[in-house]
Image (cartoon, rainbow, N blue to C red):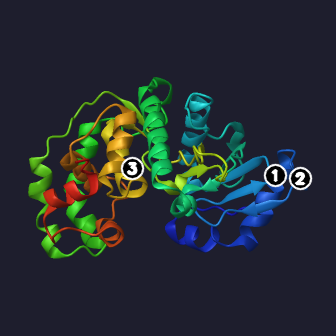
Amino acid sequence: MLPLVETDEEWDAIVPDEAVMRPGAEALAARLGLGGAPLSRFPDGSQPVYAVGDEHVLKLFPAAAAGDGLAEARVLAHLQGRLPIPTPRVREHGTYENGWRYVLMSRLHGENLAGAWEGIAPAQRERLVAEVGEALAVLHSLGTEPLADVLGPGDWGAFTDRQAASAVARQRGHGLSETWLERIPDFLASVLLPRDPRPSLLHTEVMRQHLLVDPADPADADGPRLTGLFDFEPAMIGDRAYDFVGVGLFVTRGDPALLARLAQAYGHTFEPTVLLAYTLLHVYSNLPWYIRELGAPAEGDLPALAEAWFGTA
């Protein structure tokens, strides 16, 4: 029922179209023994993802992203029960029709942290970011060898070289001003990054949007707890500092006290310039968007920007 999707044009035409996607998702759910369960598509995310009743989530990957589906299934199976924050449990995964893959996983429960954040007291926020730091410490300590056949990039030094070579063009494509653009090459050349770091399993997009929290109980002085970390589709193996790009931009969002608390729980603090360098090298880097979200101390001053976003003083 689901058509072949191999190009960006096919993706844009088919993946958002529920008239096409829903019958295919319903047929697959029935094949997996969940026929008749209510099917509700989540509004966010690049892949089509459906809640199937209260206990399951069905994530679909077209042919153009089939490798991501295999990677997510393998990573989730590798993580099962090993992190202090719950992650989805794989119920089943495999191939569907016309190159599609699927992952049927357990449904995590709770409220998205991005939506809940404003209602959480400052002291409770500190405890939540500490939970994130503790979970990252465990994630980065896990062995990566069982996943080396499905996760990239392989040669970390070659990866950072490629990303550095294309950094200016990629940011120009996002509309970054020439004042910023002309400073990028010298800044990247000034930051020493490891070419062969100890391999760490990386989520790569640790952000409030990928964390769940239990509803706050006014009678509970400790406040809410994290109940889920999800979306391991873009996982990689590489330098652990790379994971702190998302942390600084989307969890602590330039708050030095929160980042310091998270780093304390993690057990290590990274140089702000290293984290900004990885921000520029990140696969999904969009510096103009980050500047609009977090602000910038002075146009073109990358060391000052590093301190503003990733400092802990």
User: How far apart, in angstroms, are the residues tagged by discs 2 and 1?
Assistant: 6 Å
Task: Mark 3 or mark 1: name the one nearer the start of the chain.
Answer: 1
Task: Mark 3 or mark 2: name the one nearer the start of the chain.
Answer: 2
Among the 4 quarters of the image, the one containing residue 143: top left
User: How far apart, in angstroms, are the residues tagged by discs 3 and 2?
Assistant: 39 Å
**Which residue is at the front of the view, 213 or 40?**
213
Q: x, y percentage for residue 292? A: 33, 73
- Tell me: 149 left or right of 198: right
Crowd tier of the residue under label 2, counting other residues whose Cα lies within 10 Å: few below 14, some 14–19, many 20 or above: some
Say which residue appears at 14% left-offset and 68% top-offset. Answer: 300
Residue 29, numbered circle:
1
Q: Are marks 3 and 2 in contact (CB under 8 Å)?
A: no
Residue 35, numbered circle:
2
For this orientation, the residue located farthest to the right is 36
Question: What is the quadrant of the N terminus in the image?
Answer: bottom right
**Amino acid on which disc 1 is placed:** Ala
**Amino acid on which disc 2 is placed:** Gly
Q: Does residue 288 lie above or below 145 as drawn?
A: below
Q: x, y percentage for residue 117? A: 52, 59
- Tell me: 236 left or right of 183: right
Residue 247, numbered circle:
3
Q: Does residue 103 lie above or below 253 as drawn?
A: above
Say which residue appears at 91% left-offset and 56% top-offset. Answer: 36
Q: Does residue 149 lie above or below 63 as drawn?
A: above
Among the 4 quarters of the image, the one containing residue 269: top left
